[in-house]
Every structure is written in C-alpha cells, then in structure tokens.
Image (cartoon, rainbow, N blue to C red):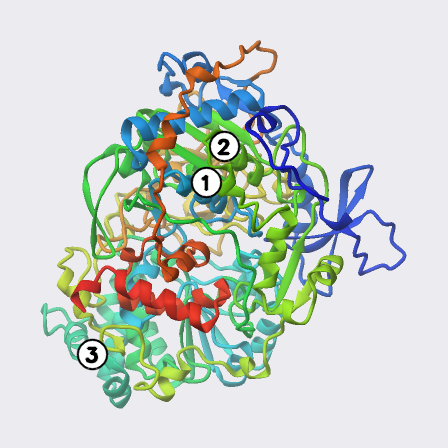
Amino acid sequence: MTFAKPTRRAFLQGGAAAFGVGGLMGSTALAAVDPNSHSGRIFHATHYGPFEAIVRDGKLVGLSPMIELDQRPTEMLTYGVLDRTYDKTRINYPMVRKSYLEGWESGDTKPELRGKEEYVRTDWDTALKLTAKAIVDTIANHGNQAIFSSSYGGWSHAGLMRPNVLQGRLFNLIGGCTNTQGDWSAGAGQIVMPRIIGDMEVYSAQTAWEVIRDNTEVFVLVGCDPIKNNRVEYTVADHGMYQPWEQIRDNGCRFISINPQRTASDEFLNAEQIRIIPNTDTALFTAMAFHVLDKGLQDDAYMAKYTVGSDKWIAYVKGETDGTPKTPDWAAAITGIAADKIRELAELLATSKTEIAGSWAIQRAHHGEMPYWAIVNFAALTGKIGKPGEGVGFSWHYGNGGMPQSGKSTPAGLSQGKNLVKGICPASRITEMLENPGMEFSYNGNKGVYPDVKMIYNAGNNFMSHQQDTNRLIRALQKVETIVSQDVWWTAATRWADIVLPAASSLERDDISVGGTYSNDRIYAMKKVIEPVAESRNDFDIFGALADLLGVAGQYYEWEQFPEYIDILKFAYGRTAAAETTSFEEFWEKGYAWQKAPTEARQWVRHGDFYADPEANHLHTESGKIEMYCESIAKLGIDDMPGMPVWQEPHEYLGNAKEGQLHVVSPHPWFRLHSQMGNSERLRDLYMVQGREPVRINAQDAEARGIADGDLVELYNDRGTVIAGAVVSDDIMPGVVSIYEGGWPQLDSKGRCNSGLVNFITSTQRASGLSQATTANTCLVSLRKCEDPEGPNMAYDKPPILEDVEIAAIDDDKLGLDRLYDLVAALYANMEPGEKIFYERCTVCHGPRDPAGFTQLQWKGILPSMFPRAGLEEAEMALVTDFLMRNASDAGAN
C-alpha cells in the first residue's frame, strides 16, 4: 500500500484524510487464548493492559484480557475500554462555540460565555481553517510565546503517537509556543530530589522485589498505595507486582502504613495503620530523628561516608538553632500521633532492615519538598540507603516499581524538533500565568516571566480537571482569545473551548508501545481495531491537516524517511532491543515481542552502587553524596525553601483550621486514570453515590452533621462548592475527608459542581518558590448535608449542540495564512548533532525541553533513565551529554 502525498485541498475535503493512519498489514488476529476463535480478534494495548478486541461487523463488541501477559486485569479494561468507545460523551463532529463562530471575523467572540452556550456542529474545513487562522493571528500579532500548550503529561493513551508529541512536532515547525514544565503528579519531588540525592526518584526504578522479599523486615508506606495506583501505567500495565507483593507479605515482612485513611494496600498487605494529620509527615520524621539521636541509634559512620550537612540538620533537630527540640512530644501535638508511638516507631525503623516508600501524594502539599527530604535524612541518619532491602523509594506505587528492569531500548518516537520559545509555565501555575502576564517567577532556581497568553491549544489533556481552584481558572480564561481542544470525549477541557476537534481513540489507528514502565521487558503492537467513530480523525492526521494549511506538511510528515505511516512504526520498533531477535513482521503478527530482563536485574538495589563505592559511583549532587543540608538550595535564598528539611506550618491544615473545618485529601481513583474512564457507565455504577463522586467521611464527623451513608453532601469553602455522595466509614480518621481527584464537572445554577470535581475547592497555593508545584492535598472545607440538589449529575452528557446550522464556506483570502511563511523561514538551521538528537529523541514529559531548564547535575541525574528510553548508542549519548552540559543553566559557572 502506498499513501498519496496530500495536498491542502485533499486535507480539507470531508471524510478521511489522504495520509490517513489505517490498519497495517491486515491486523492479523492473535487469538492466543482460544485457537478456535473466530478471526475477528485483534490485538491492542492500553494503559489498563493488553487485550484482544472482539469485532463483529466492524464494531467492537467485547474484549478478552491476555492472561499470559496480564495476570490481574481490572474492570477499567474489561468494562471501561468498551464502554467509552461508543459512549454518548464521544465528540462525533467538529464543533465551534456559537459566539465564536458568529464573531471570528469581527473579534466579538464573547469568551465569557464559554461553558454556558451551545456548540455548533461544523465541517472539518471550517474548524481547521478557524484553528489555523487563530494560530497565525496569534503569532503575527503577539509572537509565538502567546500560544500556550496545555497538553502536558502525555497520558491520553499508551502509544508513541501521543497528541502532545504530535502537537509539539507541528508547533515547533512554526517557531514553537509556551509549554509547561514539570508535571502535576510529582512537581515538588522531581525538582528537589536531584539536589538532595542526585536523581528525580519519582520516576526511577525501585529495588528488585526479590531483594525486598529476602531482606526487608519492615516496609513503611508513607501515604503510599501501590495496590491501587499500579492498576494503571504510563505505558501498558502488566500488573506484574501483585504476586510479588503477596510473596513479600507472606515471607514475614511487616508493613506499616502512615496515612489518615486505610487503603487497599493496607488491607492487601495486612499493614498496621498509624493515623496522621495530613501534611505533617515532616514533623513525624524529624521527631523520630530526635529520638534516634537521643537513644544513640544513629549511624555516624554511614553519615560521615555517604552524606554531607548532617551536623546542621542535627542541630536543628535538637533545637540548637531555634530553641525548640523536635521531640516526640513536640510532634505529637502536630501529627496527632501519640509521643510514645513515635518513639516506638523510631526505634523499630532504626533497628530493623527498613524500606520507606513515600507517595507522590505527600509532596502534593504546601512545603511538599520537606517530607521527601525528611524521609531521606531519617534513612541516612539510620544508615539505610543503598543496602539490600533497605533505604527509600518514591515510586513503589507507580509503574509497578519493584519489577526487574530489562535495561533495554524501547520504541523511539517522532521528533518534536526544537522549540524557539524559551519561556515556560510550571505545570500547576496556569491560572497564575493567565492572570499575571509579565510577572516574574522562579522555578528550579531560574527566573522566568509569564507570557501574555492569547491562545491555548489543548490536545489529549484534561487541564480543566487537573488545575486547582477551577472557578478561578474559568475566570482567568476569559482573557484568552481562542481555546482549541482536541479530544476524543467531551471532557472538562473541551467544555470551555471555542473550537473542538474530534480525535479518534487509540483503538482507531495503529501505534506501538512498551510494557512495564520500569521493566521495559516487552514491546506491544497497538493495532487498529475499528474505523474512527463518526467523523473523528486520529491526532496524526489532524495535526497533519493543520501542517498542510500552515505550509509545513513536508517537514511534518518527513515523506522521504517515512513514505508510508507503517514506516514510522517500523523505525520506532527498529530502535528496540526486541528488534535484534524478532522481525517487525513477526512482532506485528503476534502483537508483542519480549526483551526480557537479565538475571542479575533480579538482585538490583536502588542506590546500591553508591553504597558499594561512593567514590566510583558518586551521586549527581554538588557533593556527590546525600545532601542532608544542601548549600545549593540554601544559596538560592528562597523564603519558603530552606537548605534542609524543617517543619513549616501549611497555610491551611487541621492545625490552623476554624471550628468545624475538615481536611480534604484527593487521592488517585480506583476505577479511573485521573479523569479517564469517568464516562464508563458500568464503572460509575460500581462506585458513585447518587451519581456523584463518593466522599469518605468518618462516622463521628457524619453524625455531628446529621449525615447518613448514601446522603448527598456539600463540601465548600471560599473557593467553591462540590456535591458528593457520603460514604460513612471508620477507616478514615476524624477531621479528614477523602474524595478522588479526576471527576468530571457540571455546574448547577448556584455555581456548585453537581458532579464532585474536587478542584473546585482546592487551592492554587504553590508548594514552594523552588518547585512551584501543586498543593492539592492542602485544603480545608466545611461539610453539610445537601438539601437542594438540582436534578441528576449531567457531567456525562454532551453539552447543548446546534446540529442543523447552515454555515457559509470560509473565504481563504480572509485567513491570511501566508503571513506565517516569512515568520518561520530558516528557523531551525545549523543545529549541532547532539542538539538534534536531544530534540528528536530525548525530550520527556517530566524533564525540560530546554537544556537551560536544568543544572548540569540535574541533567546527569536524569540521563540514566532518559537514555535507555530514547534508545541511544554510546556515541549518541556522548553527543547529547556534551550538548546538555554546555547549555545547562549553570554551564557558565563550571
């Protein structure tokens, strides 16, 4: 099959694009489970696991989990994937907000009506031309920095052809745009940890599980819930750690959970629960350190060999610097944990082979860097880090941490090219950016200035659900001239957009992925299962159509290297280790190929090489050691980010709450991936209460407010109000309520979220001036029974749509697209080899796309995880390393 090279006219005609992403090689059925199965079975893979799709008459009618690849498939796979494919929330056609369509020429588009007025069904020609015009108008009138991409993260599907990557590919051909930096998940940890322990930690492999099973005596879960959160993965879930967790438990390891609520992991692992007031983990670990020192249980020799700055931190712990010894009695008043229990726990952890697992949740808080640092310092004080079965890990709950690593190359994606816009927005500061154009901010020790954003392009990301204080964000969006949202479903991000482009789901085009975020031990084919639903198009074609309108189709498609779409996937597969033993044709026929972890990976210990020889295997910190006090952070002079972990009172928590206020925590959902799968009706039936998000409430708190299990309740503060369904339980401590993040919004006439999206009540307070990270878990609310709900939750219905509006064809002369050509001519000439490789293959969602976004040491800390995923040869690694070292933020100082 040969694809035609499309013209602009071909793209703008109705129906499939000329360079469509179709099914490859006939998508031969796998039928691995039942060899007598009918032929309508097609292999595919998702965040939720691999499966065979069952297709009848061109329609997906069921799916069969691949038990030889995934031993613990979840309901998100067996129910959700099928349900959402044909759900009523599918965006079937291009849409334009009514006032925007009426006023695009005059400029009177009434942005204040976003989220309130109807959408008009249009054709692709109209929607794409209006999008292209908005792009060119913004660049010509305000500069590329005025276009903001909210498409961070790349969680929309498990493949290489993620919309955020393709969007970057297009926009970087026309000068770039303002991007986010960092992420919502682990924004504080990923910035502070490289300076403390030489690695992000939050996206790093964990000690191999057999080492834990055979050595660990006590495993501490600090807010960590691996049994729940490992139900999904960034790539393709294989649920490989569930049986190992059982073995670790059954081998006699004692689990202790420090958490305000009992979790699925606590039940699964028979963990002892120690209830703690949210946001006070720093005080707990500091007080345990005091008791260790008081009893002489510290490991002085370890600290002398492997750390720097212990003397300054110990002086703080003892109260020598501020007159307040950080005793267990001091911490008891802060944490709600009895002083004797703190002493008991400190002695247990110090005298046992102890592994401490920190969740991402504890750093999504005001001063969120501090608990991570306090955990590291406590583990260093007691001589744990780097020893088999001991130490710290901050990714046990993600990517099936603990699985042995193959260490082998994974598929290489398409290049995003170089973004000439240097400015960034920290991922959680979008609202602040929109409200304060020209304001200076600090991020990771660097200064930045917020752009004056006039256009937002959002592809495959639900930023309207992620960002805190949603009401404030909605108000801030009114100053933006155009918002384009490209998605499969009517998520929150589409309902406040001006132009909505219907994307096809991953089931509706071919792609490739990898199994196991850390193990990387198998490559998956994501075969096309069905044709795109209604008039939806895959993301590759949508951006290709825009590239054609903007005059950069040749660069976007790279026809000389990739004459056909299949060549992109062949190229990607060819970069993997699996390609050395399994041909692409064999891989595609079967649906997967192995690249198994070597035997020695089963004995790998996190920080083990450093422990074995700290001189030869030094950490990528300033000192090469664990920095219990960090001079480089202290020298930044950031008011809320001292040079060591200290207790700092959060701006709102139970310690300063008004009478009757409760602390809200918002963990990751059980039946969703953030907001994904919210539109599966069968899944909602499993957990929602009267059609709303469930909120877990302690029985005492419920009784005091006249609330019974199953009642609708209101959680409210000065930021907003959400309606949720009460789940009354003794498994959460008094004073704390828990509601999952990722709900879909629907506002009633009083401005309440009738669905239960928690971010209508969370705060935009930053974690610190170092990380600018989210503080979603630092939130106080009042609670009452809801007496006047306004009908059912309509969040999972389509917005009002006008179907039969006659739309005049757009005159191309009014678009002025040719203005772009002179603006982008020769923008990307003279790139050096290492620079080219970096932009083509090494940009990752959690790292900067600009070399100056990290220091040299921070880059060194991320390179070990970045290079294998990029599939680089040694010579290529050297070129990229040299480029990054010469262009890092501190290159001139070294």
Nearest-to-viewer mark from 1 and 3: 1
How crowded pointer 1 is (Cα within 10 Å; few <14, some 14-19, many 20+) is rated as many
Q: Determine the secondary structure under disc 1.
A: helix
Mark 2 to mark 1 CA distance (whole Å): 8 Å
The picture places residue 713, in percent across and down from the top left corner, at 46, 35
Residue at 69% in and 61% down: 584
- Whether residue 539 is visible, yes or no, is yes
- Does 874 sit above or below residue 477? below
- Does 633 sit above or below residue 132? below
Give the numbered dot on residue 310: 3
The picture places residue 505, in percent across and down from the top left corner, at 62, 40
The picture places residue 211, in percent across and down from the top left corner, at 52, 82
Please state which amino acid type lies under the numbered disc 1.
Leu
Please state which amino acid type lies under the numbered disc 3.
Ser
Residue lying farthest to the right in this orientation: 36
Tag 2–tag 1 contact (CB < 8 Å): yes
- Does 30 sit above or below residue 629? above
Give the numbered dot on residue 546: 2
Q: Earlier in the sequence, mark 3 or mark 2?
A: 3
Residue that mark 1 sits on = 170
